Amino acid sequence: MMAGGSLWPVIATLAAQGAPGTEAPPPPPAPEDPSVAVDAAPAEQPPEELTPPPPPVDWQEMVPDDLVTDMIEGRRRPGYRPDLPDALSQDNVGALRPPPPQAFPGIEDQLPVPDRWRLIETLGVVKERWFDPYHQNTLKGDRAIDPDKVKWLPIKGDDWFFVANAVSDTVFEPRTFPIPVGVQTTERPGSLDVFGKDRSLVFAQTFIGGVALIKGSTAFKPPDVEYRLTLAWQANYVDVPERRVLDVRPSKASHRYDSFLGVQELFVDKHLGNTSDRYDFYSVRLGIQPFQSDFRGFLFNDSQLGLRFFGNRDNNRFQYNFAAFWRLEKDTNSGLNDITQTPRDDFVLTANLYRQDFPVVGLTSQVSVTYNMNREKKDVQIDHNGFPVRPALIGDLRGREYDVVYLGYSADGRIGRINLTASFYAALGEDRNSFFTSQPAEIRAGFGAVELSYDYDWMRFRLSGLYATGDGDPYNKTEGGFDAIFENPIFGGADTSYWIRQTIPFAGGGRVISINGRNGILNSLRSSKEEGQSNFNNPGTIFIGAGADFDLSPQTRVSVNANHLWFENTATLQALRVEGSIPKDIGFDLSVAAIWRPKATQNIVGRLSAAVLLPGDGFKDLFDNKQQNDAYVSILANVILSF
């Protein structure tokens, strides 16, 4: 009972809202004395003597049909079915045929439209602008191509899409690292030490443009056909303090400007079929295409000429790849694909299988088999600066060929609150000519890398470790140093790290040989990652690191990394340097980076980072000079604009 009031108004209201044909009893008259509670039943009329309600009234008999739905605007009597209007004709070209009006009572005047962009433009919500990548744009594949407007394109149907991409990548990088003094001449008379000045500068501007023609709606299924072309043009300027670093000729200056246009993608992708009603599929792709063999790019991460068969199963829980690549030559100074040269006699065959939520929910596992068949024993390759890169100028200087199989397992995901990424490889094969013995040697090497991270609010804390075996005896019949095919790792700070970013030349014991390669973490003693061969006579790598990422805002991130590196085994270095002992300690690699995204997207990204290498005993033993450098520094300013 409502305090201080009567339930009759409530009962009357509920009765009025009840089923048609039921009339609510009228409320009792209000009492004359307002002080008397109106919810008290009158004494002179007991509740059981109340007048019964009148019989039900048939509203349909009293009110004509055409007035039933107009009595109260916006309401219709339940159960009432008016006569349906004549069927509407379908004049919206491209839309699906609508169901009959009888299927949806009340929406007889509605028709579907072919796409939502047409609707929102009609309403004036969005106006397309060709230069705006943030909103609906036909150039970004948001709307199908109108064949009548591009009759020169050999396409049929209304499900073809065009996608254009443009990227500007600007790099400014001052750095210091050990630079050997030229043999014939020097930049400064009187420079008689093994190492000269260590300061250098790199400026590189890269423009990447790509176009794709895609058939099929890819919002929930793979494209039926895709044609893609991506070109990259780079202009770079380098200034170093010594001669014969940038060019083999001593007469050339110690600075250089160069430019090159490379083809980074040129492929056709064909959808072969589906295996389920949820679009599990299988497709084939032929041409120059990117491929990454594991989650972090430790073994093979490159864009090469190849044939790839791929797909998925079981609602995308399984993904698989079967691919064969014929490696292209690279431009020396830009690292871009050079299709004007004959492809290398270097082939990569790979197969992998991904399984989501295995062995635990949230973790994706991958198993892979990769075969690298190199047949460049009789190939002599001189890079664009005049330096020999195949065979490498190390050991017996003879050509090499090898067969190596990489058996791998990788994982990426999370276990509870811990994020996990890991990769493990075993390298098994044969080197037909070990450059120490000029005899065949078995390849037996291993690799492992793990990164753990923990997210706490806007912070991520990381621990990482890497172990790549080194060769313990360069003169036996086994090569135990692990080397990749083409590494480009996203690990330990990536290219913010000094050791990953910089190339350290191995002066003394090898000409035009580097301990590590640019954008690489392995101590492989190769002439070039882009143009040289894998080398399994190397000192190996041990890496332990800690880092943290701080998302100060959606636009700003600060990352810090502290890494320590060692050679796994220095026997190869001792043999090449003819030294009795070389310590394993490379040193500490410390770096900090700030990333700024003013639009909170990847369309505008600015990065400024600084890294320093504090040399350990092993590094000082290899690169000691009269300057007694206590630290080597790398600064990286990078701006990326994307459309």
Image (cartoon, rainbow, N blue to C red):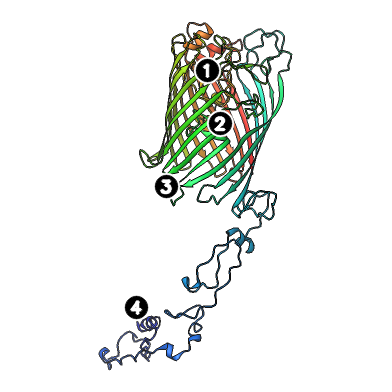
Q: Quadrant of the N terminus?
A: bottom left
Q: Which residue is mark 2?
A: 302
**Residue type at mark 1?**
Glu
Pair 1/4: label in front: 1
| Label 3 residue SS | loop
Q: Which residue is mark 3?
A: 315
Residue type at mark 3?
Asn
Q: Nearer the viewer, mark 3 or mark 1?
A: 1
Q: Position of residue 438 (x, y in %)?
A: 51, 9
Which numbered tag is attached to residue 2?
4
Distance Cα–Cα, label 1 vs label 4: 96 Å
Spatial CA span between label 2 and label 4:
78 Å
> Could you say which is closer to the camera, residue 49 or residue 117?
117
Q: Earlier in the sequence, mark 1 or mark 4?
A: 4
At numbered mark 2, what does the secondary structure look like: helix, strand or loop? strand
Q: CA distance from mark 2 to mark 3?
A: 29 Å
Which callout, 2 or 3, points at the residue further toward the start of the chain? 2
Q: CA distance from mark 4 to mark 3?
A: 58 Å
| Residue bearing mark 1 | 401
Image depth: mark 4 or mark 3 in front: 3
Observer-nearest residue: 204 or 43? Answer: 204
Tag 1 secondary structure: loop
Query: Residue 415: horizontal and vertical position, in percent?
Result: 38, 39
| Nearer the camera: disc 2 or disc 1 | 1
| Location of residue 318 in the rendering, given as x and y in whole percent from the top left corner | 42, 41
The amino acid type, in three-letter code, at marker 4 is Met
Give the residue drawn at x 57%, y 72%: 88
